[in-house]
Amino acid sequence: MKRNRRTSAVAVLTLAALVTGTGAGFAATATPPATPVWPAAATHASGTAPATATAPTRSFHGTLPEPTGPYAAGEDIIHLTDESRPDPWVPSSGPRQLTVTMVYPAVPGTGTPAPYTTLAEAAGIIQRRNMPASSGVTPESLSGVTTHAFDGARPQRGKHPLVVLSPASENPRMMLTSLATDLASHGYVVALVGHTYEDSGETLANGRTPPCAICDDPTRLDFDSVAASRARDVSFVIDQLTRGNTAWPLAHLIDKHEIGMAGHSLGGAAAADTMIADPRVRAGVNMDGTFHPVPMPGQIDRPFLMLGVSGSHTPGSGDGIVWDRAWAALGGYKKWLTVTGADHFIFSDGDLLLKQAGFPTPPFSPERGVVITREYVTAFFDQTLKGIHSPLLDGPSPNDPDVLFQR
C-alpha cells in the first residue's frame, strides 16, 4: 500500500469560504479575492452569510471535534486506478485514478496523529484562491490541525459496515473528516473518496496533484453527468474494497453485505445515483444537495435520509420542491429532516475551521452543526445497517429543537 501522507489543512478553510455547493462561487472572478468571500446561495447551497470576511490577526490552531464513540479512528490513504475507464474530465491522463482516505475503528492509544492533507493539495488551494499571508492562515499554521485520526493505528477486531462519503462540488475529500472519524469511532469503516479533477487537487499515487478541470465555468457544467461519474467512482471503490485485501490491507474489516453512502451537496446527489446504479449500497444520505437527476419511482427502494437546512429544503419551497419529487419516488424507509437557521456548510468541517481561524461565520453554531450531522447520520446508519433502533429518528426531540421532522 502506498501511503502518501498529508501535511496541511488549508483546503478546508478556503473552500468553505469560497465555494458554493454547485461550485458556482469557485470561479466567479478571473482574479481571486484577497480575502475569503461568502458565496450567495446557489443550486446546492443555502442560507446567507456576510459578504466579505476580514483578515484575522491571530494565529490559527485548528481542532476538529473528538469522536464520540468507544473506538479510536485509524487512518490509511490508498490509491486506486480503474483500468477499464478513462478519466471522464481529462481523457488524455489515462485511466481514472482516485485517492481514498480509509478511516476505521481502532484501538485507542495506538498509531500517530494523522495530518489533514498533503502539502501539494494545500498548495493547490493557495494558488487558486490567492489566500494572503496577512490572513494568518498558512500551510504552516494549518498543518497542525488536530483530526483525531491516527496513522498506523491497530484495528479493532471483527467486521464492520462500510460507509462511503462524497464531498460537495469542488470540495476535497477531507472536508468530511469530522463525520468520518466519528462514524469510525462508532464501529464503521469509512471511505472518503477524492473525485480527481473535480476540486483544487487530490494527490495521486504518482505524486501529482492535478488541479480542477471542470471548475472554471460551472454555469455550463452538467451536474447530472458529474453525479453519475461520482457514482461510477464509488462503485469502483466498493469493488476494490470488497474483493480481497489487494487495494487495502485492512479490507478484511469490511462487512461487504452492509454498505451505506452519504454525501454533502453534489455528493448527496451522487449518493442517490449510486444507489440507483449499485444495489450493494443498502442505505443513503443526502446532506443538503439537489438531486441530479431526481429519482424515478421504483429506482430507490432502500432506506434514504434527506438531511438539509430549512432555508432551502422545506417542503413546497425553494429546492424543497425538488425534494418533494424525490420523496414521492423513494420506496423504502425514509426520513426528511431540516435544521432551522443553519447554512449549507454545517454538514462539513468548513464553518468550524473558519470560526477557529477568526473569520466571520453564519450565526448558526458550527459546533452545533457538527453535533447534528454526526448524531443523525450515525443514528440512521445504526438503524439501517446494524439493525439498532434509534429513538432519535422516531420524531422531534426536546434536546434538538432546531431539527425539524418534515416528513
Image: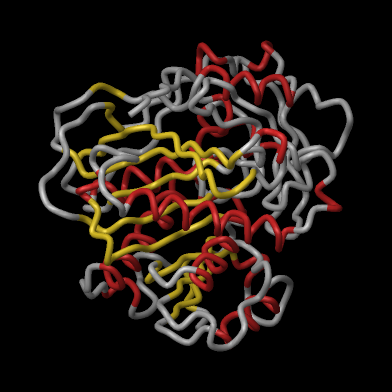
Where's residue 179, x and y in %? 40, 48
Q: Residue at x 45, y 78 (%)?
A: 335
Q: Count of labels shown? A: 0
Asked where in the image residue 375 lies, by quadrant, the reply is bottom left
**Residue nearest the observer in this picture, 227 or 317:** 227
Residue at the outermost front position: 84
Left-right relation of 386 to 271: left
Q: From what the image shows, is residue 170 above or below residue 343?
A: above
**Residue nearest the observer in this picture, 275 or 249:** 249
Where's residue 360, x and y in %? 64, 35
Q: Residue at x 72, y 39 (%)?
A: 90
Left-right relation of 202 to 76: right
Asked where in the image residue 257 lies, by quadrant, the reply is bottom left
If the image is split into quadrants, where does the N terminus sit?
Answer: top left
Image color mode: secondary structure
Where's residue 286, x and y in %? 53, 64
Residue at the outermost left position: 157
Q: Residue at x 33, y 60 (%)?
A: 378
Where's residue 298, x and y in %? 53, 87
Q: From what the image shows, is residue 238 above or below residue 141?
A: below
**Residue nearest the observer in this picture, 216 or 142:** 216
Q: Residue at x 65, y 23 (%)?
A: 124
Left-right relation of 197 to 178: right
Residue at the outermost right position: 30
Q: From what the image shows, is residue 329 above or below residue 158?
A: below
Left-right relation of 251 to 31: left
